[in-house]
Amino acid sequence: STAVGVPVLPKVAPAIAAGIAKRFENPDAPPLNFIICENLIGAGPFLREKVRECLDPRFHAALDEKVGFVEASIGRMVPFMTPEQRAEDVLLVCVEPYCELPVDAQGFKGPIPHIEHMVAKPNFAAYVERKLFVHNASHAATAYIGHLRGHEYTWQAIEDPVVRKEVEGLLAETRAGLVAKYGLDADDLKAHGEDLMRRFANKALGDSVARVGKDPIRKLGPNDRLIGAGRMCLEQGIEPRHVAFAAAAAIHYDHPDDPAAAQVQRVLEERGFKGVFTEVCQIEPDSPLAKLIVDESRRLLSEGWL
């Protein structure tokens, strides 16, 4: 499996290619599967092609026929590690109790192995969007809205009734969109959202607004957790007003230690919302979602958030 971060995937491709070549020197070798534990839609095809570029053409047929690149939906949160903990054991990783790993059942070559807590899902696209538009979207909303309320930690933000109301509204919108699009169980999605807010309130995680909100350029991307969620809702006939409110908060996110946030603020100051929509969100400035975000930004201003 990989768990290295999306930018590092191309750097591990040569090692994976070398392993595949060694494995299939024997043409009768059984299939080989890699579980890709990265936050990237389309991670399977992406890594497959990076490996292909590094792989002797003699093994390309084996790559296509016998090697599975299995996408996973990562939902487990890792607490902040203190310098003292890192000094004691650089390999130590602490995690929250939540433990489930949905993976793409159709990504495997050969039989699906039994791995504790791994759940192979045939309708995996629904679980990718559930992760992105429920978990990631509500987490980001907690951070960006919490920042405007002056909170340092996500647990402080989600315990703020004003922030919580907005996050609950966002979850209701994305839940309705996913039910309409994929036929997911509404009660299960609601319970999942409530469990997420309970987990966000876990003080032991020590999760900061700065960490969760980091890199708003990526998180305001056209297919990412906020803009992507808004577009999905609109495609299903649902007005994503709370999603738009979170996106407006993200556009106004001005954490001093975040270079991406500073860049968004420069675009906003120099070219206004039109510039942010065009250059960061990559949506049409006169689109329904853009208009909702502008409306919610006005609300931020009128209600004294900014």
Image: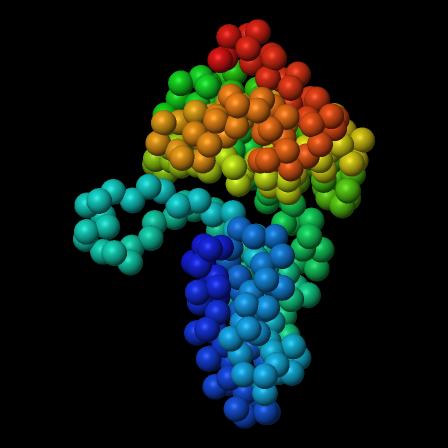
Q: Is residue 305 above or below residue 113?
A: above
Residue found farthest to the right: 237
Give the residue at x 59% y 44%: 131
Q: Residue 43, located in which quarter of the rendered image?
A: bottom right
Side of 113 relative to 204 (left or right)? right
Give the residue at x 72% y 38%: 232
- The answer to whether residue 238 shows anywhere in this view is yes
Q: Could you tell me residue 14's position as x and y percent?
A: 46, 73
Q: Could you tell me residue 46's position as x and y percent?
A: 59, 62
Q: Is residue 294 above or below residue 181?
A: above
Q: 272 or 43, which is in the foreground?
A: 272
Side of 161 relative to 174 (left or right)? left
Q: How is the image coloured?
A: rainbow
Q: 67 or 155, which is in the foreground?
A: 67
Q: Residue 254, located in which quarter of the rendered image?
A: top left
Q: 237 or 18, which is in the foreground?
A: 18
Q: Could you tell me residue 12's position as x and y percent?
A: 44, 67
Side of 223 relative to 304 (left or right)? right
Give the residue at x 79% y 35%: 236
- The answer to whether residue 117 shows anywhere in this view is no
The total number of labels drawn is: 0
Q: Could you tell me residue 300's position as x and y percent?
A: 56, 14
Q: 275 or 186, which is in the foreground?
A: 275
Q: Is residue 106 above or below residue 193?
A: below
Give the residue at x 46% y 32%: 263
